[in-house]
Amino acid sequence: MAKIKKVPAAKGDDADVSNNLHGAITKSVAQKVLNALAVKSEVRQKVYGKQSVYVINQEELNDMDSKIEELKKEVDKYKEKNRQLTSELAALNNSLTNEQCEERLKVLTEQNRKYEERLKELQSGTKQFSVDDAKRIDEKFEKNRKFWRQRKRMFDEIVSTILDAIDMKKKVFEDEELCIERDPIDINEDPLKDL
């Protein structure tokens, strides 16, 4: 049950109503307005001797409370709808425009065409890689071969330094079980010459 709020009542004195309105209406006009409202049942009039007290109907206040709750629920509903529409608008603003989509489609179509051509070449077996690819592979091979030579030379220098220090011949050193593996391919020979 809703708690009944205590409503401050204006004193029934017409002069008090007139004074509360800062003299905007006169005492006689205030009396007529209050009597008219009492006749329409918009305010209740209680007469105590020569004085009248006017109060607002409490039922109307209860109705107003329920109406306020309904309006609050409606406001919440509209706020939620507004949030949804705002997020939808933001998503639409962040998406590509039709012109941007058409441009992107052209770029992707061209890319797809190039990939299809490349796929056909690879499937046919006529052209496995381009001249640029061959150059890149050759450069990488030469670079790795250079590292191979450098490391082989460093190993040979280290072994000869050790052999000088322990006064041992290279043949005797290699014959012992030291688990040193040599490259089966001569470093100065081109391993791809037969290809």
Image: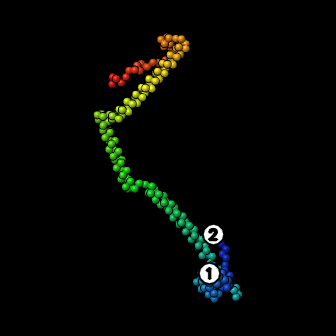
User: Residue at 65% across / 70% down in the picture?
Assistant: 3
Q: Residues within 10 Å of mark 1 (few under 14, many from 20)?
A: some
Q: Which structural element holds mark 1?
A: strand
Q: Which residue is mark 1?
A: 43
Q: Could you say where residue 91 lies in the image, as x and y percent from the top left?
A: 46, 56
Q: Which structural element holds mark 2?
A: loop
Image quadrant in which you'd find residue 185: top left
Tell me the CA gap for discs 1 and 2: 21 Å
Residue 187, numbered label: none
Q: Which residue is mark 2?
A: 2
Q: Examine the rendering and report whether any part of residue 17 can be seen.
A: no
Precedes in sequence: disc 1 or disc 2: 2
In this rendering, the answer to whether 109 lies above or below 7 is above
In this rendering, the answer to whether 98 lies above or below 157 is below
Front position in the image: 97 or 153: 153
- Looking at the rendered structure, the kind of residue marked 1 is Val
Q: Quadrant of the C terminus?
A: top left
Q: Quadrant of the N terminus?
A: bottom right
- Looking at the rendered structure, the kind of residue marked 2 is Ala
Color scheme of the displayed model: rainbow
Q: Could you say where residue 158 lies in the image, as x and y percent from the top left?
A: 51, 19
Q: Residues within 10 Å of mark 2 (few under 14, many from 20)?
A: few
User: Residue at 47% across / 61% down in the picture?
Assistant: 85
Front position in the image: 182 or 59: 182
User: Residue at 67% across / 76% down in the picture?
Assistant: 8
